[in-house]
Amino acid sequence: MTGVTSYTIRDRASALVVGQSCAVNDVMSRSETTEDGGGSDLSMQCSTKEELFFAHLYQNSLLHRYAMNSVQPNIVRSYSSEGYLKLPLPQTTYEWLQEWYLQNEELEEQESNAGAVGTQHEVPWFVRHVPGDLKDRLALEVRPMLAEWSGFTEEELELTSCYGIRRYVNGSKLRMHVDTVQTHAVSVIINVAQENMEEDWVLEIKTHDGTYSYVTMTPGDVVLYESAKCLHGRPDPLKGDSYANIFLHFKPGLDKW
């Protein structure tokens, strides 16, 4: 790690490929810091109308994410000193969550494309959907640490999304991004399992002072983070067999939010 982020959307957008024969080239023709507001020079070569259609969808997703990355960190309020905190998950919580994951391999399905953030068009992702009652249980058990860190009471933190358990495989990447501001004020990543990792799959987070933190996780670790404000991602490819996470997102149930 060099102390600066290893990825920006502009740096890697030109390498994106949609489908087998439809390339999206030079998706961002201006830098992330430009103030001219100019348009993008978009060039695509598609062999079918279907490829062209999906290329445009992907392109639009990239542009939307680019706008969010440029604006949101500057206007969304903060709830903590740095923007994130790594903690161990309570042991009893980790034990039942890991047990469910290991016992439900047959529920796993391949995930659909998640737009500009993920790289499922290059390497497939997989998910085992935790049932609703266990999502509620997990939210209940992580709320105390989230409340202490964010300054909200447990009652003020409304669960807006719980997704996973998502399993990434060798070569997976997550582009730097911010999450939906209306629903993802404070969020949780729980690392549930890893298999045959050659090296840590580092989570990059841009903190409130503008520097980048490089966070490593082991099974049972939790990262609390301000996902609508802090740029975050795993832009370097995963090196190993698999890496499984579950994500929870909360917003404060307050008028001022």
Image (tube, rainbow, N blue to C red):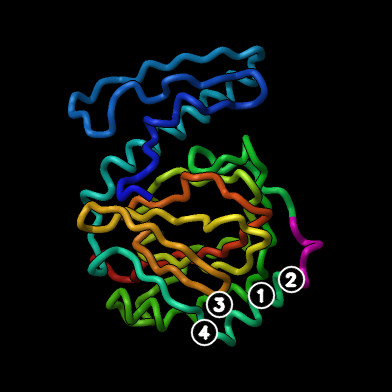
> Helix, strand or loop at disc 3?
helix
**Looking at the picture, does residue 97 appear above or below residue 249?**
below
Q: Which residues are magenta?
A: 102-108
The Cα–Cα distance between marks 2 and 1, rounded to whole angstroms, is: 6 Å
> Helix, strand or loop at disc 2?
helix
> Helix, strand or loop at disc 1?
helix
Residue pointed to by mark 2: 102
Residue pointed to by mark 1: 98
Closer to the camera in the image, 98 or 202: 202
Task: Please give left or right for residue 66 compared with residue 164 in the image.
Answer: left
> Which residue occupies 33% across, 58% down?
213
Whether residue 156 is in magenta: the answer is no
Can you give x and y, in whole percent of width and height, for residue 142 in the image? 47, 79
**Mark 1 surroundings: few (<14), some (14-19) or many (≥20) residues within 10 A:** some
Q: Earlier in the sequence, mark 4 or mark 3?
A: 4
> Which residue occupies 62% across, 36% down?
122
Residue pointed to by mark 3: 138
Label 1 amino acid? Gln
Q: Earlier in the sequence, mark 3 or mark 2?
A: 2
Give yes or no for contact between labels 2 and 4 (Cβ–Cβ under 8 Å): no
Give yes or no for contact between labels 2 and 1 (Cβ–Cβ under 8 Å): yes
The Cα–Cα distance between marks 3 and 2, rounded to whole angstroms, is: 17 Å
Label 4 amino acid? Pro
Label 2 amino acid? Leu
Closer to the camera in the image, 28 or 140: 28
Residue pointed to by mark 4: 90
